[in-house]
Every structure is written in C-alpha cells, then in structure tokens.
C-alpha cells in the first residue's frame, strides 16, 4: 500500500484517464477526492472505490472557476485533513482550426486545460508548503510538445508543461515536487465524437506508434503512480512521455524514405 497515508485530488476523475488514476491510487490505500464538472460521473467513481473497500469522496467542480476550486480543496481539507497529491487531469479540447475557431472556444479550452492548473495549484500550495510535502502531477499531452492540430488545447498543454517547470523550481525548496506526463493517443471517452465519424480511427493511428498500438488509461496511471510515489523523490520539473514512442521519431516516414532510396538504387 504505497499511498496508505496520502490524500489525493484527481480533477476530471469521472472519466477516462482520471477515473483509472483514481482507482489505482485508491487500490494503493490513498484517500481520493474525485472531482469532475459532471458530478454524477465523479460520484459513480467514488462510489465504486468505497464499495471496493477504499476511501473516496466526490465533488462537482468546474476547475476553471476559482470559487469551485476553492470549494473542492476546502472539502478535501475538511474530510481528509489536507492534500498530499494534486493530479491536474481535467482538460477540454473543443476547438480545432485556428482561423475558424471562435474566441469563446479558445477561452473554453485554455481555461479548462491551463487556467485550471494555475487555480488548483495556487489553492493547494499553501497547505502543501505548510506540511513541507506535496506532489503536483499535471497530465499534459504529446500535443504540448509537437504539432498534432487542436491549436487552443495544444497551446494550453505547452503552457502546462512550462508551468510544471515553474512550480518545480519555485517550490522545490519547500518540499514540493511537480511533474508532467505527456500521453499520446489513449483509448478514452474523449475520442467518442471522432470515433462515431471514423470507427477505425484507433486502428489507423496505431501504425504511427513505434510500439504498434495506442495507449490505455492504465499506461498513464502507472506513470502517475510512480511520479507521485516516494520512489520518484528526486524527480521534479520533468515531462514523462507516455506515448508508445510517438515523439521519438516517425517510423512511417522512415519507411517511406527507405523505400524511396531503395527505389533509386535499383
Ligand atoms: N485520451 C487521449 O488520447 C489523451 C492524450 C493526451 C492527453 N490526454 C489528457 O488526459 C487527460 C484526461 O483525458 P481523457 O482522455 O481521460 O478525457 P475524458 O474526456 O475521458 O475525461 C476528462 C474528464 O474531465 C472532465 N472535465 C473537463 N473539463 C473540466 C473542467 N473544466 N472541470 C472539471 N472537470 C472537467 C470531463 O467531464 C471528463 O469527465 C486530459 O488532460 C487530456 O488532455 C488525453
């Protein structure tokens, strides 16, 4: 039970990666606050944890609204006595093409994805600094490191990576660690809309991944548990790519190049 005495908030914990991170931390003995803007989702995850003998509560929280973030952390402090790990996992990706994007859509994506990390971190930090112990774990994206479309979301994820570094450097001396995870494509409900239009999408995407498959929420959860654990006590300010090798290079392009050269030689 690596997290038996730890109190953990998981934002966007009602679905996908956040849900599995919540379940995995709970299975390691942590007390979990499952927070989601859709309260029923968070409630269901918390109920599942409690039914399995774990410790969880839920809050209905829009993490882009400071008063709601305040209420979320206050609830965690009242019920569990504080916060040891904050997993900033909630994000939105509604916009795409920059020229066609409405200003309101830009704001929606950037607020849910980046401003939320500012608001939640700002709110938990005084308590963490007071106890001289705390971990902030930000779920960024491969989109924050390279271009894959979705401009507002991607710019926000790049901001999350930079903010992770700021948190790590500024608060390291006070016992705080901050790290980011940059996942590639992960099989979660965030893809529902695209999968309805293109049911074969995941199969098509798999060929871009050196490891030959897209990721599962568990792939991210395993990395999250490690970075939040004491085993990572000298790791801060880093971005761990959990992307099946996607950003290490372009295998499909490499094959094209090799085929081209071979054609020229023959
Ligand atoms: N699935 C992927 O392919 C992928 C790839 C890279 C990064 N990520 C990142 O992983 C994280 C989790 O994504 P997912 O795929 O599990 O998505 P998901 O849609 O399954 O879950 C996200 C959850 O966040 C909640 N949420 C959204 N905005 C919120 C807000 N303002 N306040 C509170 N809750 C909010 C949603 O209600 C939802 O329950 C996100 O940060 C996402 O950007 C996902």
Image (tube, rainbow, N blue to C red):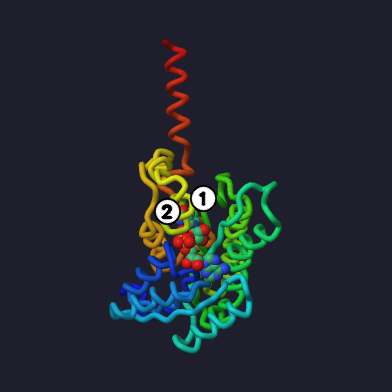
Position of residue 82 in the picture relative to residue 154 (left or right)? left
Mark 1 residue's CB less than 8 Å from ligand 1: yes
Residue at the location (66% across, 57% down)?
A: 106
Q: In the image, is the residue at mark 2 within 8 Å of ligand 1 by its beta carbon?
A: yes
Q: Nearer the viewer, residue 1 or 10?
A: 10
**Based on the displayed image, in which of its 4 quarters is residue 66 positioned?**
bottom right
Q: Position of residue 5 (x, y in %)?
A: 38, 81
Q: Nearer the viewer, residue 22 or 124?
A: 22
Residue at x-position 54% and y-position 62%: 91
Place of residue 36 in the rendered image (x, y in percent of width and height, measured from the top left): 50, 72
| Residue marked by disc 2 | 186
Hey, which residue is sitting farthest top in the picture?
266
Residue with the most extreme left position: 52
| x, y percent for residue 189 | 43, 59
Residue pushed farthest front?
197
* Residue underneath mark 1: 142
Q: Residue at x 36, y 75 (%)?
A: 3
Residue at the location (36% across, 45% down)?
Answer: 213
Q: Nearer the viewer, mark 2 or mark 1?
A: 2
Measured Cα–Cα span from mark 2 to mark 1? 11 Å
């Amino acid at each position: 039970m690596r997290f038996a005495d730890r109190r953990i908030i998981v934002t966007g914990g009602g679905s996908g990666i956040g849900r599995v991170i919540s379940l995995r931390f709970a299975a390691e003995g942590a007390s979990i606050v499952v927070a989601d803007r859709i309260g029923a989702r968070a409630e269901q995850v918390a109920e599942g944890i409690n039914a399995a003998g774990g410790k969880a509560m839920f809050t209905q929280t829009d993490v882009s609204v400071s008063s709601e973030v305040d209420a979320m952390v206050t609830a965690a402090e009242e019920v569990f006595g504080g916060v040891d790990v904050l997993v900033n996992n909630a994000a939105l990706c509604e916009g795409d093409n920059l020229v066609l994007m409405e200003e309101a859509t830009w704001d929606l994506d950037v607020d849910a994805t980046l401003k939320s990390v500012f608001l939640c971190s700002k709110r938990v930090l005084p308590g963490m600094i007071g106890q001289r112990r705390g971990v902030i774990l930000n779920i960024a994206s491969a989109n924050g490191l390279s271009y894959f479309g979705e401009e507002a979301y991607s710019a926000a994820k790049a901001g999350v990576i930079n903010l992770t570094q700021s948190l790590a450097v500024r608060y390291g001396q006070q016992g705080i660690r901050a790290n980011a995870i940059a996942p590639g494509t992960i099989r979660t409900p965030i893809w529902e809309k695209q999968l309805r239009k293109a049911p074969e999408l995941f199969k098509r995407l798999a060929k871009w991944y050196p490891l030959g498959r897209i990721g599962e929420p568990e792939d991210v959860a395993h990395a999250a548990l490690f970075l939040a654990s004491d085993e990572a006590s000298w790791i801060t300010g880093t971005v761990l790519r959990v992307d099946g090798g996607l950003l290490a290079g372009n295998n499909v392009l490499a094959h094209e190049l090799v085929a081209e050269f071979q054609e020229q030689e023959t």
